[in-house]
Amino acid sequence: MIRDTDTIAMPGKPHAVPATSAGALRSDPFAGSRYRVTGRLGRGGSSDVYAAEHLALGKSVVIKVLKVDLADNPMSLDRMRLEAQTLACLRHRNLIAVFDAGCTADGRPFFVMERLAGQTLLAEIRTRGWLPVEEAVALVQQILAGLSAAHEVGIIHRDLKLENIFLCDPDDDGRRTLKILDFGIAKVLPGADVVRAPKPLALRSHEGMPLGTPRFLSPEQVLCREVSVQTDIYGTGTVLYELLTGRDPFFNVEGYLELLDAHVSAVPPTPSTVAQQSIDPALDAIVLRALAKAPELRFESAQAFSDALAAALTLRRVPSRPPRLEAAMPSRRTLAVGLFVVLGSALLSALIALLIGRAL
């Protein structure tokens, strides 16, 4: 998808340039295909994104196409094709769906995705500042569910951030579904059979340059080391941190090199010390574990991360009960026994006194 994915849709209805404005575009890149452009939605570093309509079905779709000036760039071509293959092989409610692909008349690859109504998490946070704990955790659990599906088939996203996560408008039951976008720099792990990566594999960093978005890079990405499931755990940890606090883990760090160094060596402030809401120590510990510098210290899987969040929420919902008043007061049974003992002692004392009086 694109870097400014929050421009794809607005709350309540899909956002696009009206169909009457399509003629204002310089050209329709999909002329001769089964799709007609209805508007431009956004531009990324390597691609353009359009609103379009399937001519035969009249269905609204979103199409991502490689930019004209990159049509002869082998790496860009491979990335686009691999992203299309990756998304097409994944079937999960929390992942954007791809259902068609092709090439424009001038040979640029494109793929067709479902049309969503809503906005990115970045737009959501810009509007609200931060999200309540239970809402933030529930959304992150949806992210982890989508990642689990990708990880199971050997695909690592490695560019998780708020603008790459789309929050759909509420459905009829009031539920909001979350969709992970932009698998443009995804990593296909060795042995994954679902995606036939081009040869040589294009998704690599330039020599000595980390691949990803600087403010959200994992330590291993900064150091240009192998990525793994734990790389996405780190990315999800940054997202959770932002949802809870309204800030990224290294919000107080400026400068490109300083930021890279912070990912490798600096421990971020504990969320509870930054947030404007109450965050339990258990949740603090979960976030910091997800952001651990060493991959092996993070959660072993997306599911394990989700399970830990569920346990933390369960603890949060258990009310802390004050000591019962009854526990500090004698029970009725205790009072009755005490009274019986006192009366018995009094009667016994009186009887002994009577006997002694008669004896005298």
Image (cartoon, helix red, strand yellow):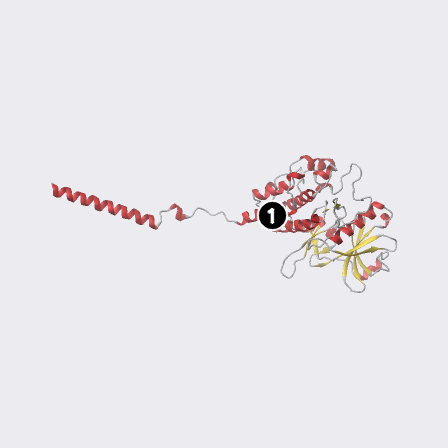
Give percent across and percent down for residue 81.
80, 50
Give percent across and percent down for residue 234.
67, 42
Give percent across and percent down for residue 84.
78, 52
Looking at this view, is 73 or 300 the one in front?
Answer: 300
Q: Which residue is at a point 59% across and 49% down the rendered structure image?
A: 310
Name the image quarter holding the C terminus: top left
Count of numbered circles on the image = 1
The quarter of the displayed image where residue 23 is located: bottom right
As helix, strand or loop, the secondary structure at mark 1 comes to: helix
Q: Amino acid at mark 1?
A: Asp
Drawn side of residue 22 relative to residue 129, left or right: right
Q: Which residue is at a point 40% across and 48% down the rendered structure image?
A: 325
Looking at this view, is 150 or 334 the one in front?
Answer: 150
The quarter of the displayed image where residue 97 is located: bottom right
Give percent across and percent down for residue 120.
70, 52
User: Going by the picture, which residue comes out furthest to the left?
Assistant: 360
Drawn side of residue 211 relative to residue 286, left or right: right
Looking at this view, is 63 or 249 the one in front?
Answer: 63
Q: Residues within 10 Å of mark 1 (few under 14, many from 20)?
A: few
Looking at this view, is 45 or 113 the one in front?
Answer: 113
Would you name the residue on which mark 1 appears?
A: 307
